[in-house]
Image (spheres, rainbow, N blue to C red):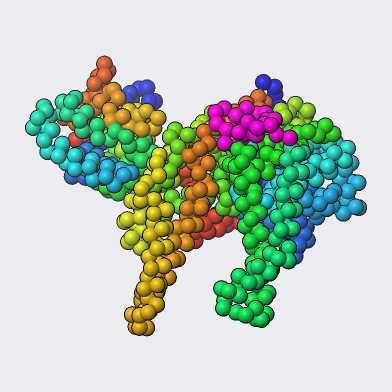
Amino acid sequence: MSDLSIRESLRGQNLLITGASGFIGKVYLAMLLERVPETGLLYLLLRSGKRTATQRLAHMFDTSPVFLAVWSRCSPEVAQRMRNRVQAIAGDVCLPNLGIADDQLDALRTNLDLVVNLAGLVDFDPDIREAYAANIQGPIQVANFTASCKNSRLLHVSTAYVSGTKGGRIPELIETETPNGQHFNPHTELQSLQDEIAREVDQSSAPHNLNEIRREICAREHDCGACPRHRCMAPSLAASRLRASMAALGSHRARELGWTNTYTYSKALSERLLSTRTDLQLCIFRPAIVESANRYPFTGWNEGFNTSGPIIQLLGTWLRRVRVGTHKAIDLIPVDYVAKGLVIASASLIRGRHAPVYHCGSSDHNPITVERCVELSALAHRQYWKQHGPSWLERRVLSRWDARPVTSEPWMGISLWKWLSSSISTMSRKVALPLPHAQWRPLHSFGRRCGIWARKLARLEMVLKTYEPFLCESAAVFECKGLRRHHVIEPEFSFAPEDIDWFDYMLHCHIPGIRKWCLQDSKTRDPIHVQPTA
Amino acid sequence: MTQETLGTHDVSLQFTRSFVGRRTVVLGYLLSNRAGFRERIGHTLGHLGLSMVRHAILPKHSAASERLCFSLLRGMSQDRITVLATEFAQRFLVPTLPEATRERWRRLRSAGWRIRLISNHIEEIVTAVCRQWALEVDELVCNRLQYRDHIATGRLTSPRVNEQRRTPRTSEEFTIQELEDLS
């Protein structure tokens, strides 16, 4: 174990951070600003759209609860000094030279000491083109830019779930095989992925495909094909079908190779492509499932709705049984622990004492099982509905409904209810057709309501299917030795996930945090009473 | 005066005079809020039945009788028991504690006495009451449920505090003083 002083290591160092406007990025930036005042300039790569990059930065500083909390803890002068240490750079990670203007490039290449790449698309099964651009093309461009800098050090943030469906203890290594044990060449895979995307796009934009879609629309709308509105619908329908087929392509490719979804597949591919580079000092940081803040910037802070948010929301509804694997650990890690881990990794990379890969999770030292997670979520929802339930039904019944972890699919599962709703909907509409209007109307409306229920249940089924690998299949424990190898001198940066009290965290931080910040619950949402600095 | 010169003061939380404070009722509340609907009904009915017959078939407050009583909690998670105990304490027990007890407690603390709290309730209940009332305790002597992987085994760990005698079964002797004053 070696001593590492964060403040000494980062003293006067200039950092370029991509993806700083994201969930982890904001907390990492706030931590650097507040706790490491010795750091040099912090350049943030921000896309400019309606607002310029500088305006976006100012807006983030003035409106984000993370920064409002930071400003509220210090005097206006100190806050202003902190703001002055940050500089917005207009650009885009997907573009060559990160889309940075030429007049800024040379200065940046000379001044930068470290590039931290937090940019990415955290969507489990998106259109593969979007995942490719954000999670594969982006890191490649960031690596190219870093290699062109005087001090070419890159801290790339990936995910611990690049291990895919592989179980057991996952070491802090870059694997050379796919999770299901096939040989994996990242360059060949990238080429084949690009070819498949191009083929799908060609097929979709082929004239015969568009004509077929037009014919389909005409048949459905009982139109002869002359209506201009229907003619205009064809390209948009083709585009939406292309998006669906691209999403399916990504998911299929990921599962074929043993990854759980497009996100983990694209992250794994980018990691492996970067690891083949010899022209830069690289460190890969792999956080597990990043969740609400435990303490920093304040208890319960969360943003976005894409990690455990949807499933936790479902556990507070009428959903009663959730299929989970027995005694399987789920690796949750609060965002402040991730930010601490990132600071440690940044300092060690600057010192040249870094490990090639850092895992940042809790399953190695303080595991929580999926069953316990479901139980705690149900209890947290129980407390919420008892206190804030809008009606008697929520306060008395829903609060006691309690989602339960089960090991096998219940026979009266969602599929059955979906089939029933859909069948009733179809039947009632068919039966209603020959009836006179007075009898037809209620039956038809009932059928329509059943149809809506069927669609809702289909969505629910899809969400559960998306999370199935994490709840039922994955039994991975991510070794977390790298971050603990460094003996950090400053106690506020010590990385100790064993300190997390899961009961307290789930009941008093995470789930109230999700309700407050992600579900925008007005009942529990009290704004932070701080004024943005001038 | 220092703590050393004053020594230890044993106090006991008594809810048994009120109906809701009875351990049978507390257990009934925990069991009627188990996770599964079938478990809720089955265990609550079982508990009711047991409460009625266990004293008839077993000596009152015997170890076997106590064990039978707590065995119904088997399979409940520690998290659920803690949440339910807090709920119960907040809703039913805290309002039944007389304000005089609280005052006396504070007086003793401010006088420098070490307080050893003795209760025949389970730890989760007593802790919740103390937390709700912001009562500071130096030592807690109460019944503790045994857990394995955060799941209750349905057994109590030693020492057990008996409802009738209110003395823990340990080698140490706990003197109970001024119980009447506090209740």
Q: What residue is rendered at 74% in x and 37% in y? A: A186
Image check: B107 left or right of B169? right
Is B34 rendered above or below residue A521? Answer: above
Which quadrant holds the N terminus of chain A?
top right
- The reply to whether the magenta stretch includes residue A183 is yes
The residue segment tinted magenta is A163-185
Q: Tell me where residue A22 appears, x and y as whole percent.
A: 66, 50
Image check: A352 left or right of A484? right
Whether residue A300 is visible to the viewer of this picture, yes or no, is no
Q: Tell me where residue A481 appears, x and y as whole percent.
A: 62, 26
- Place residue B81 in its image quadrant: top left
Q: What residue is rendered at 76% in x and 56% in y? A: A47
- The reply to whether the magenta stretch includes residue A414 is no
Please name whichever residue, A180 or B100, is drawn nearer the observer in this view of the structure.
Answer: A180
Q: Tell me where residue A404 appears, x and y as whole percent.
A: 38, 44
Is A48 rendered above or below residue B166? Answer: below
Furthest residue in direction left, as rendered: B56
Is A236 rendered above or below residue A282? Answer: below
Please name whichever residue, A8 or B75, is drawn nearer the observer in this view of the structure.
Answer: B75
Q: What residue is rendered at 81% in x and 34% in y? A: A277
Which quadrant holds the C terminus of chain A?
bottom right
Main secondary structure along the magenta-highlighted residues = loop
